[in-house]
Image (cartoon, rainbow, N blue to C red):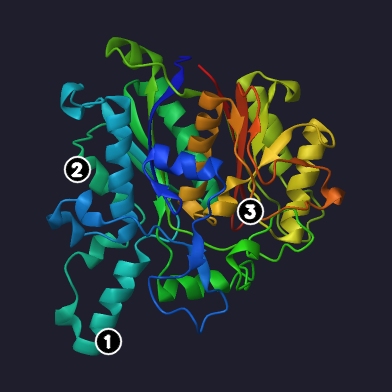
Amino acid sequence: MSTRALITGLGIVAPTGVGTETYWHATLNGKSGIDRIRAFDASAYSTTLAGNVDSFAAAEYVPGRLIVQTDRWTQLGLAAAAMALRDAGVDPKALPEYGLGVITAASSGGNEFGQREIEQLWTRGPGAVGVYQSIAWFYAASTGQISIHERAKGRCGVIVAEQAGGLDVLGHSRRVLREDGGVLISGGTEAPLSPYALVCQTRSGRLSTAGNPEECYLPFDRRAAGFVPGEGGAMLIVESAESARERGARTPYGEIAGYAATFDPRPGSGRPPALCRAITLALADARLGPEDVDVVFADAAADPELDRIEADALASVFGPHGVPVTAPKTMTGRLYAGGAALDAATALLSMRDSVIPPTVGTARPDPAYGLDLVCGTPRQARVRTALVLARGAGGFNAALVLTAP
């Protein structure tokens, strides 16, 4: 079955804005959401900056009974899912009983909720641990809570592959639609700004220790020295062309035309990284060639070794300076499970408005990388096909090809 997977709705909760148009306006204006961590006093940590979603108040989007049951990560997901459904004009009650499903990406899970309950355990004893601790931390919590709240009885699931998971869920959603049809809520969010979560992240050695928000995340720059984390993400409504036609949906944002996932070989094996293979497989899946791609939304790790691997993969497929490349995540930080889903949403907005958003901070990209990096200001361009890349800690690679309707 060759059912087309269309994206008909977007819901965005990001450090640069809550709501799709608010986020998009800030992105095109190069407005960064990176500042000192506000969730707690991080002055004793090596990393003190992050992308904070300051304008999000859970009570405005999530019922009170769910707030006490859920971590901030899930609350962000519930809000983004509701926005996406509204944007797509989908009324879950009007769909067939099993016509709506939920597939989300997860990375660190409900770490803030879990830390709070562990603190209760050690300071007040087991009787002080809340009953919702058993589910709020779990990787599938957002999928479960969204499915219950939106009455989604169709296919549901969760994929854990760190940043790559935000693309994996969209690829998996296309597979599910080919088997079942219908409508899916798909994407990811993240809330990694708690003391314990930050400790876990700093152990990777990939986080920036810079104190200046304007110079803390500089991919493909000679000064690159790691990234900063961020919270938020995006949910997308992915549905079959048949479903969109039957309910009279408006023109979709775009289509999932190609997808591939690969896994890096173990260090020391002598085998090359697998990102390049993910790109070529995704293009083959879309039945497109490198010349068809109008823009690449890069993974942009801001680590010299990882940036070199990504630049080499792009040069291998497209040639030096062969395609415009951008990394608007420099304005939000890396959102882990939410980051690639947000990049996919951003790529769709880029197609809609024929403009490539900028990479901020990296004013002088290192020419050794051979990239046509869109820096500083947006670039007007006809965007009909976008390639979105993501890598997750441990060797995950994902590539997604999106095409305009």
Q: Residue at x 36, y 55 (%)?
A: 139
Element class at badge 3: loop
Report, in whole angstroms, how far the alpha carbon at label 2 lies from the one at label 1.
32 Å
Q: Quadrant of residue 202?
A: bottom right
Viewed as shown, does residue 211 lie left or right of 279?
Answer: left
Q: Residues within 10 Å of mark 2 (few under 14, many from 20)?
A: few
Which residue is more in the foreground, 367 or 244?
367
Q: Quadrant of the N terminus?
A: top left
Q: Reply above or below: 317 against 130.
A: above
Q: Quadrant of residue 402?
A: top right
Dot 1 amino acid type: Trp
The tag on residue 148 is: 2
Are dots 3 and 1 in contact, CB under 8 Å?
Answer: no
Q: Residue at x 27, y 87 (%)?
A: 122
**Residue 33 pos. (x, y %):** 49, 57
**Residue 211 pos. (x, y %):** 60, 73
The tag on residue 72 is: none
Among numbered discs 3 and 1, the one appearing first in the sequence: 1
Q: Reply above or below: 65 against 314.
A: below
Q: Residue at x 55, y 40 (%)?
A: 28
Viewed as shown, does residue 180 lie left or right of 208?
Answer: left
Q: Which residue is mark 1?
A: 122
